[in-house]
């Protein structure tokens, strides 16, 4: 029985390569908008030993994008660049997440309002937007700036500066 030439993949080797690609893709995490640099470092470390083509690396990252991320790179998906697809996509995604963080901080500083919610609910929303990017002292000052003056006066004489305790006090005064 004749053996196939070395450069022609056999059915077994093709199946093995497909299985390796599926295994690799399943290990790559979905796109993180909060820490994209870390995700790309991890992804590139996993892809490097595989010696994948630019197209393959691009396709793997595209398969892991969220809806929001896809909306920001639709033009690159519809008409990908001829060369450096992966690097172009990576650069655009990093730019998108930087502008997203800026918008979140702007919203935190200028657009937050107490409205009908309790002070503790406002604090939770502000914490969600801050995502550990703002020190608690700064967050406390921003949060208290959105509270009614009567609530701020009570908090000013409070012995504690711990946000959770202050939000409980503010909720009780606000009612």
Image (tube, rainbow, N blue to C red):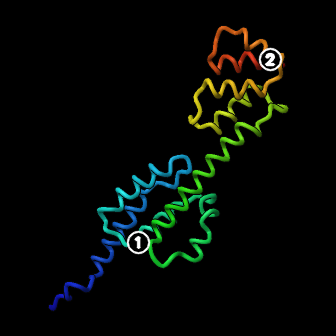
At mark 2, the secondary structure is helix
Measuring 26% from the left and 86% from the top, which residue is drawn there? Answer: 8
Image vertical order of residue 21 relative to residue 126, above or below: below
Crowd band around label 1 with a 10 angstrom C-alpha radius: few (<14), some (14–19), many (20+): few
Q: Measure the C-alpha gap from mark 1 to mark 2.
A: 58 Å
Measuring 63% from the left and 50% from the top, which residue is drawn there? Answer: 100
Q: Is residue 3 left or right of residue 108?
A: left
Q: Between residues 122 and 18, which one lies in front from this camera angle?
A: 122
Residue 124 image position (x, y, % from top left)? 68, 31
Q: Earlier in the sequence, mark 1 or mark 2?
A: 1
Q: Is residue 108 left or right of residue 94?
A: right
Image vertical order of residue 56 relative to residue 101, above or below: below
Residue 49 image position (x, y, % from top left)? 29, 62
Measuring 49% from the left and 61% from the top, which residue is drawn there? Answer: 90
Q: Between residues 172 and 95, which one lies in front from this camera angle?
A: 95
Q: How many marks?
A: 2
At mark 1, the secondary structure is helix
Give the quadrant of the C terminus. top right
The residue most toward the left is 1
Quick check: marks 1 and 2 in contact, CB under 8 Å?
no
The residue most toward the bottom is 2
Q: Which residue is mark 1?
A: 54
Label number found at residue 170: none
Residue 135, image quadrant? top right
Crowd band around label 2 with a 10 angstrom C-alpha radius: few (<14), some (14–19), many (20+): some
Residue 16, image quadrant? bottom left
Image vertical order of residue 154 relative to residue 94, above or below: above
Q: Which residue is mark 2?
A: 151
Q: Between residues 138 and 10, which one lies in front from this camera angle?
A: 138
Give the quadrant of the N terminus. bottom left
Residue 99 image position (x, y, % from top left)? 62, 52
Measuring 19% from the left and 88% from the top, which residue is drawn there? Answer: 5
């Amino acid at each position: 029985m004749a053996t196939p030439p070395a450069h022609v993949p056999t059915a077994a080797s093709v199946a093995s390569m497909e299985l390796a690609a599926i295994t690799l893709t399943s290990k790559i995490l979905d796109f993180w908008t909060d820490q994209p640099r870390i995700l790309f470092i991890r992804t590139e470390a996993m892809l490097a030993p595989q010696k994948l083509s630019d197209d393959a690396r691009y396709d793997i990252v595209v398969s892991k994008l969220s809806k929001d991320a896809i909306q920001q790179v639709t033009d690159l998906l519809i008409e990908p660049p001829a060369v450096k697809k992966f690097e172009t996509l990576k650069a655009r995604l990093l730019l998108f997440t930087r502008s997203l963080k800026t918008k979140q901080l702007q919203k935190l500083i200028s657009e937050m309002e107490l409205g009908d919610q309790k002070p503790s609910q406002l604090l939770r929303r502000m914490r969600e937007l801050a995502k550990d990017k703002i020190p608690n002292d700064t967050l406390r000052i921003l949060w208290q700036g959105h509270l009614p003056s009567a609530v701020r006066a009570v908090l000013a004489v409070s012995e504690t500066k711990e946000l959770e305790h202050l939000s409980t006090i503010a909720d009780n005064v606000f009612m």
